[in-house]
Every structure is written in structure tokens, then in C-alpha cells.
Amino acid sequence: MKFTAYERTKQGTGASRRLRSAAKVPGIVYGAGEPAMIELDHNALFFALKKEAFHSSILEMELAGKVQQVLLRDYSMHAYRPMVMHVDFQRVDATTKVTKRVPLHFVNEDTSPAVKTEHCLINHVVNELLIQCLASQLPEYLTIDLGHLATRGQTLTVADLKLAEGIKVVTHGKRNPVLVSVTAPTVEEAAPDEAAAAVAAPAAAAASASAPAKAKAPAKDKEKANKK
């Protein structure tokens, strides 16, 4: 993906506030040289951040007539308004080693025997992985094929992934984290209180319907006594 950035000469809280008022976003580019202060068009950046590839792939940034390869490293949003407050990028090249979170794309879930035949549920334990590799090897996403899942209790782990040479999953000390698990479908049962209330409701309705008739009986007896 390609985007355009502009050099930013003024710094400080006041300058950043004026930029945001003008629908611009202050930012910085660091790595492989001196840090550069930049500004970007807010709306263009806001909609770019909604795209998965903008977060997990090498980007081409045009700055001062030159194109640089960068990675999105961080950004901050306003506490309650849909406004980007600041953004950070890192310059990279083919030899730069990066650590980045990459989304997982699950395919063939509906056609797997576990779902189609056994009527099980497939639980996505994680939806992204932290990987380490050269910037030139960074994948936009990792595809997880679920088509061979067949039985309840079956799992897919990091060890089951087929990654290109040089790409390593960072597990933070966990030996073989589970990515996907197959579970039996759950059947919801009514709570005891709810079931008792459902049984009691018709009985209460019947009792309330017969109550007026009983109340009128003494009145008829009194009328007969007066006639006598």
C-alpha cells in the first residue's frame, strides 16, 4: 500500500493541536537514519487504518518526493471521538528484522467433517500471531486451513503451521500454543427458576380466573336470607 506524508516543521502541543484542527495528523518516522517529523491527511489515514493490510504489511510512504518503505508501529485515537491523534512509522529495508503481529485467515471451516458431519463447533482461540522475520518476508496474513478437522477434541497448534523458512512465531515461553479447538455443540437448558416460573404461570392464571366466582357466592346466600 502507498500513502503520502508531508514534512512537519513545527513541533509542540500547540502546533499539533492546530494540525488536528486543520484535519491533519502529526506523526514520526524513525529507524535507519534520523527521525523525521511528518504530517498526514486525517481522513486518508483514518480509512487506511480500517484496512488489515495497513497494519501488517510493508507500506510505501512518499515523503518529499522520495518513496520509503515503512511499517506502521503505533497510533493513538481520541478518547471518544473518531479522530486519529498521532501515528508512528518505522523505516525498513530487505535486511531489517521485524517483529510484528499478523492476522490469521481461517478457511474451509464450513466444509470440514467436524462441522459438516459431526456438527461440532470450531473455536478460534487466537486471531493473530506475533511473528519475527526479515521485512522482505513479512506476510500480510497467515492462512489456516480447517478442512481436515474431523473429531471433537481435535486441535491445531503453532507446530501445525507450515511457515516459510526464516519466519518464526514468538510464543513468549509457551511451548506449543493452541490456535483452534473442536468442541461439541452446547445445548442451552432453562434455568430451574425459569422452569418453575413457567409451570406456575398457568396455575396462577387459573386460580385468578376462579377467584371472582367464589367471591360472589356469599352475596347470593345473603339475598336468599333476606327473602325469607
Image (cartoon, helix red, strand yellow):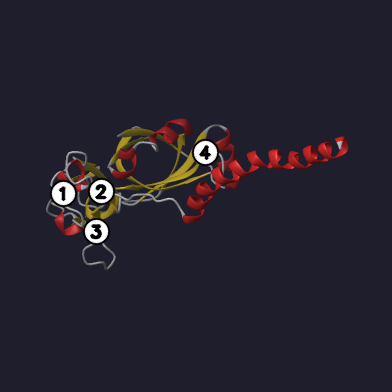
Residue picked out by circle 3? 178
Of mark 3 and mark 4, the one earlier in the sequence is: 4
The secondary structure type at the circle numbered 2 is strand
How packed mark 4 is, by other alpha carbons closer than 10 Å (few <14, some 14-19, many 20 or more), is: some
Crowd band around label 2 with a 10 angstrom C-alpha radius: few (<14), some (14–19), many (20+)? many
Seen from the viewer's position, the closer of residues 128 and 189 is 189
Q: Amino acid at mark 3?
A: Val
> In this view of the protein, can residue 46 be seen by the observer?
yes
- Picture coordinates of residue 203 (x, y %)? 56, 46
The image's mark for residue 122 is 2
Task: Please state, as top left, top right, bottom left or bottom right, where the N terminus lies in the image.
Answer: top left
Residue 83 circle label: 4
Cα–Cα span, label 2 and label 1: 9 Å
Q: Disc 2 marks which amino acid?
A: Ile
Distance between the alpha carbons at the discs numbered 4 and 1: 42 Å
Per the model, the C-alpha gap separating discs 1 and 3 is: 14 Å
Q: Earlier in the sequence, mark 1 or mark 3?
A: 1
How many angstroms separate mark 4 from mark 2 (CA)? 36 Å
Is label 4 or label 1 in front? 1
Q: Return the disc, 4 or 2, that comes first in the chain's sequence.
A: 4
Query: CA gap, disc 3 to disc 2?
Result: 12 Å
Q: Residue 65 in the image: state x and y as whole percent.
A: 34, 32
User: Total marks drawn?
Assistant: 4
* Nearer the camera: disc 3 or disc 2: 2
Viewer-proximal residue among 153 and 162:
153
Residue visible at 46% across and 54% down?
191
Please give left or right for residue 64 compared with residue 129 in the image. right
